[in-house]
Image (cartoon, rainbow, N blue to C red):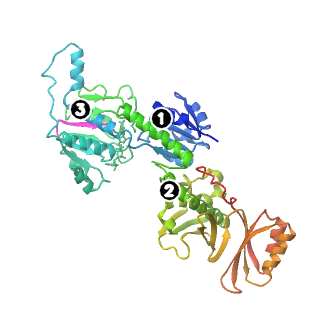
Amino acid sequence: MKSRVLVTDNLSAAGLEILNSHPDIELDVRSGLSTEELKAALQEADGIIIRSGTKLKADILAGQRRLKAIVRAGVGVDNIDVTAATKEGIIVMNTPAGNTISTAEQTIAMMMSLVRNIAPAHASMKAGKWDRKYFTGSQLAGKTLGVVGLGRVGIAVAQRAIGLEMKVLGYDPFISADRAAELGIELYRDIDEMIVKCDIATVHTPLNDQTTNLLNKERLAKMPKGARVINCARGGIVNENDLADALESGHIAGAALDVFVSEPPEAGNRLIGQNNILLTPHLGASTEEAQELVALEAAEIIVNFFVKNEVRHAVNIAPVSASEMQGVKRYIDLAYRLGLLLGQQSEGQGIKSVQLQYKGDVSGRPTKLMTSAFTCGLLHLALGDRINIVNSQLMASERHIAVQESTTKDSGDFTSLIQATVETDNGKVSAAGTIFGNEYLRLVRLNGHQLDAYLDGILLIYRHQDKPGLIGHLGTIFGKHGINIAHLALGREKLGGNAVAVVNLDSMPTEQAVKEVSGTLDVNAVDIVKLPTAGAGLPWLGL
Ligand code: NAD
Ligand code: MLT
């Protein structure tokens, strides 16, 4: 079946063409949708590509059961409620690099225009004037630029400013001193120490709780008198009212803004009326090159997601390439089945915590995905198809279930082993699984017993005393009820000691058959565990 992809913002033709011509994708381009229309359209979509125009807020994403992926053609995901998407199990991906250069060039263009009064000089000539004195500007060479946020755009701006012979200072708590030095940027770990030295400050951070109002009244006041401010990142990183005050007082000589708290800015926004300001309507990424790059990348991301299960540039799940996914699919399946097994074994006992250990070769693969898959299985009984690989960690933490994972290269008896222990109010249950011959999923440990059982279909699990004749007797019970045994695995502590049996059955045993097994002398704790059939796809990601 084709995956249906909705596009609700303007996407360049090259991107649409990729989607339109792909045999596995059905493209649906719609724009100007009302909230209700968007909600309805999403109910029939497997994926959506948006730019900044479409707002995917919690009320729109709530209850969207078909939608699996949101791709933002661009960087900022602040028009998407990522937490709500994660809760609904929807992957959010973006195209972080396609518009970096264009945005850096826009920043440099704004900086040059600002210090040379290009916009007002142009307007004055258009008004028929020839005023050379009034528009005397400043030279950039030799001036100090402070770059707040040294990510993709911040670094590209810094490199260009160095090319203009500016002295570049930088503030970013997450960049290494070595990297900054390599780029020729004087790094500060305290923004207040940097800001006092800047002739011009430009911000390039994401907008979040830490960066909202990063340049506020106090910090603007600390800048040297006559300094200038640029924001081509997100409205609100520089407090708009505080900036308007600083411009009016003359302490800040000029500001250039491409982004605003409200876009378009609300009527009465004090910044719009300032004389010493340069404004553009969020044009940082508005070049043909950038739009083509982000559209192509967004289209590729969504196609590869649906066709190859690749997760690229995801903001709410560990990334995994198509080739990695090929190698890890079976382990994701193994982890999921172990989760289903232990979820059914611990039903009604209150799950407190989970410990997963990845041993041997598997420890070098994307274990976070396997942990998420295990958690899906573990909570499947409680949450059904509401849980998936995207939201399972969140679902577990909302239920105060601590999920921990560890890895070791030491594999013990197997090339790879996934070992899971679930702590419940009633004690611990544990299981370990491996893959034989790159294909066959096996349960090799159950509550401390070594065995070799299939991890598919219907499992009847019981504990017993290791005694002659018992297995034959149970076989007779199943035979009498017309239930075929596909495989039988036994694990025992020692000859005649405590033992566990995992019986793979070809059909669901009747209540009477289970009663007879439970009533057999020396047999106790009989459980039926239902797992997907061998080779059945995983219910999410179309695996
Ligand atoms: P990025 O993720 O590559 O870089 C962001 C940098 O900010 C990172 O290095 C991070 O360490 C740093 N940072 C995070 N919190 C910080 C803090 N509290 N203080 C200082 N630094 C902090 O992102 P990017 O691609 O460089 O984009 C930067 C910004 O530009 C984003 O807000 C993005 O949405 C915006 N953007 C705007 C346009 C436009 O059209 N105007 C286009 C592209 C990007
Ligand atoms: C981005 O976040 O990529 C930019 O703001 C450009 C855009 O909104 O498309």
The residue where tag 3 is placed is 247
**Quarter containing ligand 1?**
top left
The residue where tag 1 is placed is 15
What residue type is disc 2 on?
Glu
Would residue 459 appear left or right of 307 to someone viewing this image? right
Q: Earlier in the sequence, mark 3 or mark 1?
A: 1
Location of residue 191 with respect to 27 vertically, above or below: below
Boundaries of the magenta span: 220-232
The extreme top residue here reads 128
Q: Looking at the image, how many numbered discs can be counted on the residues?
A: 3
Q: Earlier in the sequence, mark 2 or mark 1?
A: 1
Query: What residue appears at the point 48 percent right and 68 percent down from the top-left corner?
Result: 407
Q: Where in the figure is residue 324, as x and y percent of width and height?
A: 50, 56
Does residue 229 belong to the magenta stretch? yes
Q: Residues within 10 Å of mark 2 (few under 14, many from 20)?
A: some
Q: Is mark 1 within 8 Å of ligand 2?
A: no
The image quadrant of residue 462 is bottom right
What residue type is disc 3 on?
Leu
- From where the camera sits, is residue 372 visible? no
The image quadrant of residue 108 is top left
Location of residue 496 with respect to 38 vertically, above or below: below
The dot on residue 38 is: none
Q: Secondary structure at mark 1?
A: helix
Q: Secondary structure at mark 2?
A: helix
The alpha-carbon separation of the residues under discs 2 and 1 comes to 25 Å
Q: Quadrant of the N terminus?
A: top right
